[in-house]
Image: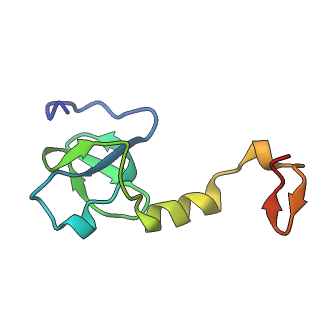
């Protein structure tokens, strides 16, 4: 990741702390928007550009996932048949 970027990203990118910056249990993936020298994330974790890497794979941040589930509509599921509280795949 280029640490010289300062322009805000238009859409979230998946980022997590680099190896050695924090313990492995805190290296979770956050959807983040670049704002100058830091990434802004839903859960409020401060992520300086110099300490993170863009990484699609990994355990997602549960706080970010929970907060995103409260505000992100899922248009493909509206009107989908449900079976036992789960979308019917058939």
Q: Eyeballing the image, is 26 above or below 35?
A: below
User: Viewer-proximal residue, 8 or 23?
Assistant: 23
Residue appearing at x 85%, y 69% in the figure? 84
Relative to 9, is 68 on the left or the right? right
Residue appearing at x 20%, y 48% in the figure? 52
Residue appearing at x 15%, y 64% in the figure? 22
Residue 43, image quadrant:
bottom left
User: Viewer-proximal residue, 39 or 58?
Assistant: 58
| Count of number-bearing discs | 0
Q: Position of residue 58 (x, y in %)?
A: 35, 53
Q: Position of residue 9 (x, y in %)?
A: 37, 33
In this figure, which colouring scheme has been used for the structure?
A: rainbow
User: Viewer-proximal residue, 90 or 53?
Assistant: 90
Residue 59, image quadrant:
bottom left
As drawn, the residue found furthest toward the left would be 20
Q: Quadrant of the N terminus?
A: top left
Q: Eyeballing the image, is 75 above or below 60?
A: above
Residue 46, image quadrant:
bottom left
Q: Eyeballing the image, is 5 above or below 23?
A: above
Residue appearing at x 84%, y 49% in the figure? 78
Q: Position of residue 89 (x, y in %)?
A: 80, 48
């Amino acid at each position: 990741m280029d640490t010289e970027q300062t322009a805000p990203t238009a859409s979230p990118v998946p980022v997590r702390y680099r190896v050695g910056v924090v313990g492995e249990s805190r290296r979770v993936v956050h959807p983040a928007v670049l704002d100058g020298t830091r990434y802004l994330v839903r859960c409020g974790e401060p992520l300086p550009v110099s300490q993170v890497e863009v990484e699609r794979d990994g355990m997602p941040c549960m706080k970010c996932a929970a907060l995103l589930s409260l505000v992100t509509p899922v248009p493909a599921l509206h009107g989908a048949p449900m079976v036992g509280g789960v979308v019917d795949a058939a």
